[in-house]
Image: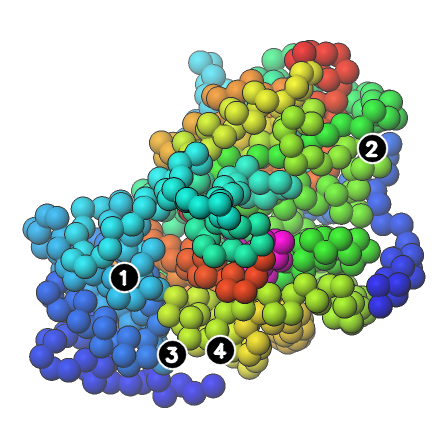
């Protein structure tokens, strides 16, 4: 019967995405990252609807949105529909915590440009990068989305990413969760034994800022309170394409030797 | 589907000398008040009458009390003993003689000032340390393997202390709570509409089950009844979630056998369902749609498109299932592995596919039907073999049953699409339980609301109750069976650790 699987596999045809060479648009109505459309469009009270305190107030009274804290619950979109909206895109990654705060202090890079440069990076990836994952207190959904990267739809081995069980063989560490106390030491140890150059990805809003558990006093309130983070991928949870985008950004870092 | 159990006279449950007072509670809850001294005795008598232990905790409403929750003949028995000013709270241990209660009582001891008389001292459950060995082993032919909390592969953090001589596993100790995030406390002070987002993020892979259980508790506490269409949509999202979770377990079993095409096929099927959920709700995990009073919005794709998608899925699944069950290299690893006799499963109060694989017909959708399941005929899928294969077979059958439920619910929705939710009262108080059958098993959530704000939430997760049994799942198995048996349990540490 084992042989019968072969025609079954062949008949499935190709299901794999061509991302990042081609963009992958989400379906209609996708609840992607929340965007701040109009910083002056709503009264200050709107900051109270956010359960994680992601909406802030500038001294002048205009609003800010910290996507690193946003769990995508949509309370603000419901309260002030013209001011906040779900973006119809998967990608959420940023290289620094500050880049996640809207409105951006500097001009955002052109999306087309980013795609093109990511495409070039992916083609150059013939050197096989090894990924290690550690759960430091996630809600479990992030693990599903990271596992999905190895399913036939996303198949990130085609881009040269492999999973390794040993941190000593790993180039990239993906951390989920806001870092609970019992996980702090195992996390630090895992990072310490990874050889340089290496990159650390904080996957999910919990890893970026602690998310809902930031104020329970039982987590560190984000991975960057424990270790230096190279790429933030907010989302509750981030979709597989968002994680792939984050991985490709981390690869750019490794190529530049930024964390060597 | 007998309903006679729910009409039982609660006074007949306990003899007169226990002095149990019957208190008014929402439908399906039999609330009994006893005093602290008679508490353990009352639970023992209910156990003898066939009750199954669910959880115990300290409640704040209607007054500070020690609460023990049991399931008996289609009803929830809520036994409560006022604690008064006693400090510490001293009572006869329940977990001392009843394995099912051991972890719940141990957690209570470590988190609150309670002193159960007769509970054997145990190693810390809720404050694990990855490097601490609790037992020193001596001898030439046995050693300990601490497996986790950093696992090989992409898995949630949990640790297993495996004692082995290389082949047999004479003793195993599961150590949860590496990822305790304080989610129960996170609910406190939120209004019910915001709090549902917390419920969705307790155990992410069962977001819908947690959101529904929470919302049902709120609705029962405040006396609201969601409209039929709202309940139907909840059932649609919940059954899609169940299918995704079950396929995840099956794909992981295929991966463990290195049956690569099988693994790829079941991953494709799971991703298909995740994409259906994404198109339907805007979220791959069905988040944001369930709310107290019903659902926030209907499905975002036409119903006939949804049914066609599910029909295609069912055809594909049928072929892969046949292949899977006929691949000897796959089934050989599952048949006979991790055998759990029925009596053992009952003693530990396990739930979900783990219990149903050992012939126990426990399913919250059937035992205490809620929402749409009150109107649908549900077939509870059980197997008697009690091994990993039985647990996988239960999941295969449940996927088919879920598809049947989905067809019925979609059919009803197509014929009559009424109101989706009711307005919830905003300044009312109350307390009640809500429950659902999560993909991992029966989930129970206790919610106390004061003036529209959450005062306390307690979660009895299926994962915690089933992990306790995992320590006993290696009667004749060897170390290399570990992954197969673990996947066959299909649990999530996020749910058990909260």
Disc 4/disc 2 C-alpha distance (Å): 47 Å
**From which residue to which does the magenta span run?**
B479-492
Taking the spot 44% from the left edge, 36% from the top edge, the residue there is B130
Name the chain letter of the residue that bears numbered label 2.
A
The spot of residue B155 in percent (x, y) is 59, 44
Q: Is residue A52 magenta?
A: no
Say which of A6 and B112 sits in front. A6
Q: Which residue is mark 1?
A: B95
Q: What sort of colour scheme is used for the picture?
A: rainbow
Density class for disc 3 (Cα within 10 Å; few <14, some 14-19, many ≥20) is many
Disc 1/disc 3 C-alpha distance (Å): 23 Å
Marks 1, 3 in one chain: yes
Disc 4/disc 3 C-alpha distance (Å): 12 Å
Q: Which residue is mark 3?
A: B74
B438, above or below A60, in the image: below
Name the chain letter of the residue that bears numbered label 4.
B
C-beta proximity under 8 Å, tags 1 and 4? no
Name the chain letter of the residue that bears numbered label 3.
B
Taking the spot 44% from the left edge, 66% from the top edge, the residue there is B350
Q: Which residue is mark 2?
A: A159
Q: Which mark is residue B361?
A: 4
The spot of residue A86 in percent (x, y) is 63, 38
C-beta proximity under 8 Å, tags 4 and 2? no
């Amino acid at each position: 019967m084992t042989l019968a699987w072969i025609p079954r596999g062949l008949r499935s045809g190709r299901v794999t995405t061509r991302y990042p060479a081609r963009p992958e648009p989400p379906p209609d109505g996708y609840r992607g990252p929340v965007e701040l459309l109009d910083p002056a469009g709503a009264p200050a009270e709107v900051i109270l609807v956010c359960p994680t305190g992601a909406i802030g107030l500038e001294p002048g009274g205009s609003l800010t949105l910290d996507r690193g804290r946003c769990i995508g619950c949509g309370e603000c979109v419901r309260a002030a529909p013209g001011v906040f909206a779900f973006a119809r895109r998967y990608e959420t990654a940023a290289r620094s915590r500050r880049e996640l705060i809207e409105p951006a202090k500097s001009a955002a890079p052109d999306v087309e440009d980013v795609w093109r440069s990511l495409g070039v990076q992916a083609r150059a990836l013939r050197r096989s990068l090894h990924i290690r994952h550690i759960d430091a207190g996630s809600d479990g959904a992030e693990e599903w989305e990271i596992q999905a990267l190895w399913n036939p739809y996303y198949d990130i081995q085609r881009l040269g990413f492999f999973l390794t069980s040993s941190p000593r063989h790993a180039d990239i560490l993906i951390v989920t969760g806001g870092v609970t106390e019992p996980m702090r030491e195992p996390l630090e140890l895992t990072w310490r034994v990874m050889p340089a150059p290496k990159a650390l990805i904080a996957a999910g809003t919990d890893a970026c800022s602690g998310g809902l558990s930031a104020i329970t006093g039982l987590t560190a309130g984000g991975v960057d309170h424990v270790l230096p983070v190279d790429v933030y991928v907010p989302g509750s949870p981030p979709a597989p394409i968002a994680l792939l985008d984050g991985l490709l950004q981390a690869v750019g870092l490794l190529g530049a030797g930024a964390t060597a | 589907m007998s309903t006679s159990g729910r009409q039982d006279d609660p006074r007949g449950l306990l003899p007169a000398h226990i002095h149990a007072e019957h208190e008014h509670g929402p439908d399906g809850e039999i609330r009994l008040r006893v005093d602290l001294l008679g508490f353990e005795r009352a639970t023992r008598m209910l156990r003898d009458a066939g009750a199954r232990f669910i959880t115990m905790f300290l409640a704040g409403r209607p007054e500070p009390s020690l609460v023990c929750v049991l399931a008996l003949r289609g009803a929830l028995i809520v036994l409560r003993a006022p604690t008064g000013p006693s400090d510490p709270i001293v009572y006869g241990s329940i977990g001392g003689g009843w394995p099912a209660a051991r972890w719940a009582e141990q957690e209570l001891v470590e988190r609150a000032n309670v002193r159960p008389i007769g509970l054997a001292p145990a190693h810390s459950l809720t404050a694990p340390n990855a490097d601490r060995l609790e037992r020193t082993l001596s001898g030439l032919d046995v050693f300990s393997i601490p497996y986790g909390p950093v696992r090989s592969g992409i898995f949630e953090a949990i640790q297993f202390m495996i004692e082995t001589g290389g082949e047999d596993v004479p003793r195993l100790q599961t150590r949860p709570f590496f990822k305790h995030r304080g989610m129960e406390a996170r609910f406190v002070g939120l209004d019910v509409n915001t709090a549902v987002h917390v419920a969705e993020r307790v155990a992410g892979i069962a977001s819908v089950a947690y959101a529904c259980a929470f919302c049902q508790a709120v609705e029962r506490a405040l006396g609201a009844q969601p409209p039929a269409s709202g309940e139907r949509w909840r059932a649609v999202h919940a059954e899609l979630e169940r299918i995704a979770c079950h396929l995840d377990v099956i794909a992981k079993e295929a991966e463990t056998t290195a049956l690569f095409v099988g693994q790829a096929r079941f991953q494709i099927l799971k991703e298909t369902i995740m994409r259906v959920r994404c198109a339907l709700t805007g979220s791959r995990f069905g988040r944001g749609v369930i709310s107290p009073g019903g659902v926030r919005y209907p499905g975002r794709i036409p119903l006939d498109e949804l049914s066609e998608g599910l029909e295609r899925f069912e055809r594909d699944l049928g072929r892969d299932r046949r292949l899977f069950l006929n691949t000897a290299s796959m089934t050989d690893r599952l048949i006979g592995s991790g055998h759990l006799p029925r009596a053992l499963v009952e003693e530990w109060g396990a739930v979900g596919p783990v219990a149903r694989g050992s012939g126990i017909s426990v399913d919250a959708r059937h035992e205490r039907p809620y929402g749409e399941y009150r109107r649908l005929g549900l077939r509870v899928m059980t197997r008697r073999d009690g091994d990993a294969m039985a647990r996988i077979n239960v999941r295969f059958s449940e996927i088919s049953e879920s598809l049947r439920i989905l067809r019925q619910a979609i059919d009803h929705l197509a014929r009559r699409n009424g109101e989706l939710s009711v307005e919830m009262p905003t300044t009312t108080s109350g307390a009640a339980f809500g429950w659902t059958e999560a993909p991992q098993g029966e989930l129970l959530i206790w919610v106390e609301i004061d003036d529209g704000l959450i005062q306390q939430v307690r979660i009895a997760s299926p994962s915690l109750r089933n992990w306790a049994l995992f320590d006993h799942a290696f009667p004749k198995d060897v170390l290399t069976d570990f992954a197969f048996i673990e996947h066959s349990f299909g649990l999530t540490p996020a749910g058990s650790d909260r």
